[in-house]
Image (cartoon, helix red, strand yellow):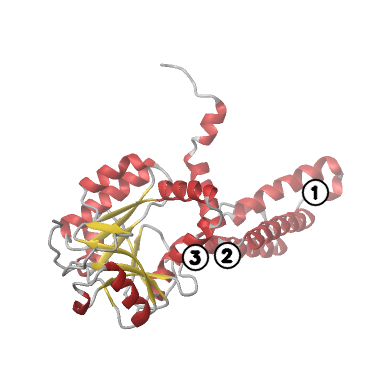
Amino acid sequence: MPGSRLPRPTLVLASPLLRRIAWHARRIARGVDRKFFLALAEGAGAIVLVAAMLVTLLEKPWTEGLGKAVPAFGQSVNWAIFTVLGQGDAGYVTTIGGYVVSWLLVVFGVAIVGTGNATARELIAELRGDEYKTKIVVLADVEKNPVGSDFYFVRGDTTSAEDLRRAGIEEAAAALVFPDAPTNEADMHSILTVMAIESIAPDVRTVAEVINPRHVEHFERAKADEVLVTSSLASHLLARSALYPGLSALVTDIVSGGEGSELYRVDLPSAYCGLTVDDLSARLRSEHHATLLAISRGSRTYVNPPSDFVLQPFDDALVVAESLGTLQPLRPGRAMPAPA
């Protein structure tokens, strides 16, 4: 309705800043041990209070009675919180002692921001730790390298053809596209990124994380090779775990590379052609200590195929194993016949 206003709670929840803070908090909480996270929060609160007390004692009118000391302490707490977040007023302190407290808070804030980059670090650690060796380049529109000096970092816009070329997209085997916020705008930016990659490097495999399931068709129109709707995946896993206790822990262990449970998609030796799925499963167990999960043929995947399923040329397999061993990872871009 023209001139109508949303209720205040809706306005608060709709704030992009609050949504981004909540999204980062959820991702950090998933990647950090709960006890550690609580200890970090308690430590941050204690440091903020101590810093505010010191600044109040050093610079504010605490000797002039509670009427001025209490408001001054409240202002110091507010200043300390914003300093940790990187938004503090440098002019709030004017003495050497105040400067020292300010510098310590800034250092502490940088440490917390480092924790906030856990998602990107975990993603790159997974790629770096895999036996399929890769060189990793990170392209992001941020001032500092978010993943450490051990990896290539290029500052730029992922939707810019020029910036993509500077990052070496034309020589890449694959590109991972994931949003920087849980918003529709972030999905739109990811779609533009996929389109930019496809326009200058169509042979590069693009894998995209999608926030809104309704946008999947747009990613497909942009010719993304794979899309992952994390919200839908989490919902299905939660539902199955409610019916079958322990399922979420099992799946998490498999996809996160637990002991003896790394996921691999591999080419199958030509000698396996003509085997039934039961014979293949036995051979993989005895020769490679690998457990068969599925067979891929063309664009179709067969999970738990019937016992009379016979392997054909160009079939590949999804397995769980301790390591690749003598198995070969699926070659990107391998020509495969269309499914019959």
| Amino acid at the residue labelled 2 | Ala
- The label shown at residue 61 is 1
- Mark nearest the camera among 1 and 3 is 3
Residue 146 in sight here: no
Name the residue carrying label 3: 253
* In contact (CB < 8 Å): disc 1 and disc 3: no
Label 1 to label 2: alpha-carbon separation: 32 Å
Question: Is 304 displayed left or right of 246 in the figure?
Answer: left
| Amino acid at the residue labelled 3 | Asp
Label 3 to label 2: alpha-carbon separation: 29 Å
| Residue at x 63%, y 59% (from the top left corner) | 34
Question: Is 135 displayed left or right of 245 in the figure?
Answer: left
Counting residues from the N terminus, which is met first, the one under dot 1 or under dot 3? 1
* In contact (CB < 8 Å): disc 3 and disc 2: no
Image coords of residue 267 (percent x, y): 24, 73
| Amino acid at the residue labelled 1 | Pro
Image coords of residue 222 (percent x, y): 21, 48
Image coords of residue 334 (percent x, y): 17, 68
Of residues 251 and 71, which is closer to you in this image?
251
Question: Dot 1, how many residues are within 10 Å of its Cα: few (below 14), some (14-19), or many (20+)?
Answer: some
- For the C terminus, the image quarter is bottom left
Q: Secondary structure at mark 3?
A: helix
Q: Is residue 25 above or below residue 15?
A: below
Name the residue carrying label 2: 111
